[in-house]
Amino acid sequence: MPIAALEGVSFGYCAPDGGTGRLILDGVSMQFPPGQVIALMGGSGSGKTTILRLLGGQLTPTAGRVHVAGQDLAGLDRAGLYAMRRRMGMLFQHGALFTDLSVFENVAFPLREHTRLAERTLRDLVLLKLQSVGLRGAAALMPSELSGGMARRVALARAIALDPPLLLYDEPFAGLDPISLGTIATLIRELNDALGATSLLVTHDVAESFAIANHVYLLGNGRIVAEGSPASLRSSADPYARQFLDAKRDGPVRFHHPAPDLAVDLGLPGART
Amino acid sequence: MKQLVALGRGVRVGVADIGRASRYFIRLVFEGVIALRRPRLVIDQLHFVGNRSVAIIVVSGLFVGFVLGLQGYYTLRRYGSEQALGLLVALSLVRELGPVVTALLFAGRAGTSLTAEIGLMKAGEQLAAMEIMAVDPFRRVLAPRFAAVVIAMPLLAALFSAVGVLGGWLVGVSMIGVDDGAFWSQMQAGVDFFDDIVNGVVKSIAFGFTVGFVALLTGWDAVPTPEGVARATTKTVVVSSLAVLGLDFLLTALMFSSR
């Protein structure tokens, strides 16, 4: 049984005047089986991050169902939603570390809030989590003293503090140098396997995510354009998949924003309006 | 027709905003009381908003006391009542200037930093991270800060008034030569504990609720961009200062009108 699933999920925002707004997800179904690393890819505005927010219960779908750990999120009250969230860890794009707390206290935060562990046990646990991301030696530092890659690793240690069965990653590779990028990618795979968890990766980065993912969903215009193992996706003939994977400038996603004819805009004689 | 629609929308949005703000206020008060069960969090914030405001409160209190001593002496001398200088300084401070000026200074010093802190936490997705960790940011972040502001305000106002009286004494007695005994005895005889001091404390607690609420809600509602946080910080000073001055008039009318 999958740890999380979307069934025919649609999501859109209402227009300011109360009318129909833009549809961000349009009848999307996905399954996230245990033990797998699943990559959600697609261009900006394709609805990837919205899926993470739906799984975290931060957004409610306009149609369809979202299941996490066998529970339909629509049927949960606030307490139920919080109980469900204790079973997931999320890595935010820039880490979202608490800037007023040290590295140690950041990782200790979920443990302090949700458990009543003795200080000694808590300390050991936090140091072990930091050890797993290679930053035990940075426990006393403040977030402002960390590099981007280190901050991401601390946030990762914090996300796995409660050993959650579901891990969500929002653009974990964005803005990292090649060494940090490779480190984070390896950590995601290793931690997923060590915890026996399911990891859901929202990313643009084709090379790194294809190297660690079991299954890839490619999103475009709120729908699943292509899906499968990284190998099968590489051989996909879908024009959007090809444009995305080969990083082509023009294709189904146009290079030029819709505009009137250039000759008309420049006011050239004989231009047809 | 367009204006009518705009007016209707404006009224609807305004009423909805008032309703939402009232709901937040009730929740802040409720959660603020619950936050006292985790005293460590409140004490940390008390240190942050209270201790760091002490310097500005003491220095301002001293100068306000100096000015009160000087102006009070010049006015009272016309009527030959210099002896009442101590009473004038003390009453002005505990009834009005202590609570009001403290609240205004506090809004500028601590209120703005609270708004900026909450706004930046929002912009850095720290509040969202807390939510996803199944920790209610309203309870964990806002409530202890609110409790700390409500506790700090009367303490700072008391400090302001005490230093102000000292300032008045320094100018009136030490420099100008008003009788020392008369300065203190008139004050002792004329300042009533319940009518003056307790009412002053009630005022500063009310200002604590006001400034804390405005600063925290403005940060909470800030647009999560650098510009949004900057705007929110300015809004905190403007709104809380006006609210304190308006509320002061109301409270003064209620407290001191019968005498």
Image: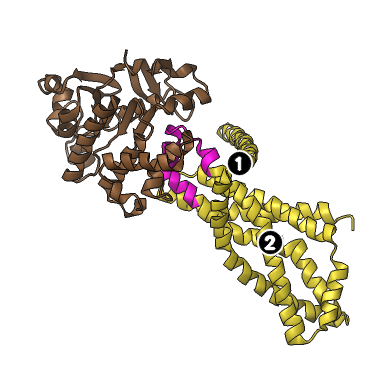
Chain colours: A brown, B yellow
Magenta stretch, overall SS: helix
Write down the region rendered in magenta.
B116-141
Name above or below for residue A60 compared with residue B225. above
- Quadrant location of the N terminus of chain B? top right
The residue at which mark 2 appears reads as B157
The 10 Å Cα crowd at callout 2, few under 14, some 14 to 19, many 20 or more, is many
- Residue occupying the point 31% across, 50% down: A138
SS of the residue under disc 1: loop
Foreground residue, A91 or B110? A91
Which disc number belongs to residue B37? 1
Q: Is residue B136 magenta?
A: yes
Q: Position of residue B200 (x, y in %)?
A: 76, 58
SS of the residue under disc 2: helix
- Quadrant location of the C terminus of chain B? bottom right
Check if mark 1's residue and mark 2's residue have beta carbons within 8 Å.
Answer: no
Q: What chain does badge 2 belong to?
A: B
Quadrant for residue B163, please give it.
bottom right
Q: Is residue B95 magenta?
A: no
